[in-house]
Amino acid sequence: MKAQTGLTLDRVTLGLGGVRLLGPLSLTVAPGEIVTLMGPSGSGKSSLLALICGTLDPVFTTSGQMLLNGRPLDGLPPERRGVGILFQDDLLFPHLSVGENLAFALPPGLRGRAARRARVEAALAEAGMAGFADRDPATLSGGQRARAALMRTLLAEPAALLLDEPFSKLDAKLKTRFRDFVFDHARGLGLPTLLVTHDPADAAATGGPVIEQPATADPPQRSS
């Protein structure tokens, strides 16, 4: 298969206990594009993201090929894949300050305490959280925690972004604001982005292609 810019899945399948949960799935998510994978619980959506990240439990069986900007991901450890992921829960470390949480994701090539602090402060300001670096994560609102989690993910400078239903626990008003915040950043940074959700409103908000993943192993259908 010819390598393409973006995130490419080529005939990817996912199974468990002899049952095919997902696929074969082939798609390319272009830089700045947001593709949505929808389907019921148990249809393999989140497991697919774990497969792309390199964190899938080995109890699953898989086949097919995954490439990011033409580079095969198969067999690479998670830290070398260049893939960022945002979950339902923000997963901020409770024993670290807000700034330390973000600094945890900074690439090792950024050296010097002042430079690293400046990068964190800039990210917080971009999230509307200037001056929050020394705050305890427990003092943040739900929306602030969500924004901090996104900025931490982006500070790692991923080449692709995966979204595992990150809006599902937010109330309707906060969901809309945070969803726009995430999508604007993904597009602005030119990140190929794959969203899994069961909410049609999330899919519609992307303005991108939607793949309906059935509960069976029938081939998924893609629509625009």
Image (cartoon, rainbow, N blue to C red):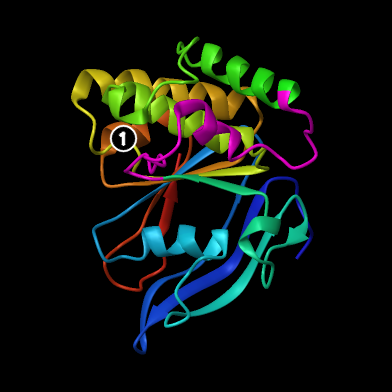
131, above or below 182, in the image: above
The answer, for residue 146, to whether it is visible in the render is yes
What's the amino acid at mark 1? Answer: Phe
Residue, disc 1: 167
Residue at screen point 36% across, 89% down: 18
Could you say which quadrant of the image residue 104 lies in?
top right
The image position of residue 53, as x and y in percent, is: 56, 59
Quadrant into which the C terminus falls: top left
Q: Is residue 217 left or right of residue 123?
A: left
Residue at screen point 23% across, 30% down: 170
The answer, for residue 207, to whether it is visible in the render is no
54, above or below 131, in the image: below
The image position of residue 47, as x and y in percent, is: 41, 64
What secondary structure do most residues of the magenta stretch adopt? loop
Q: Is residue 141 left or right of residue 86?
A: left
Q: Is residue 168 magenta?
A: no
Residue at screen point 25% across, 39% down: 168
Residue at screen point 54% across, 14% down: 126
**Of residues 176 and 169, which is closer to you in this image?**
169
Tell me the magenta residue range. 87-113
Task: Give the structural element (helix, strand or loop) at label 1.
Answer: loop
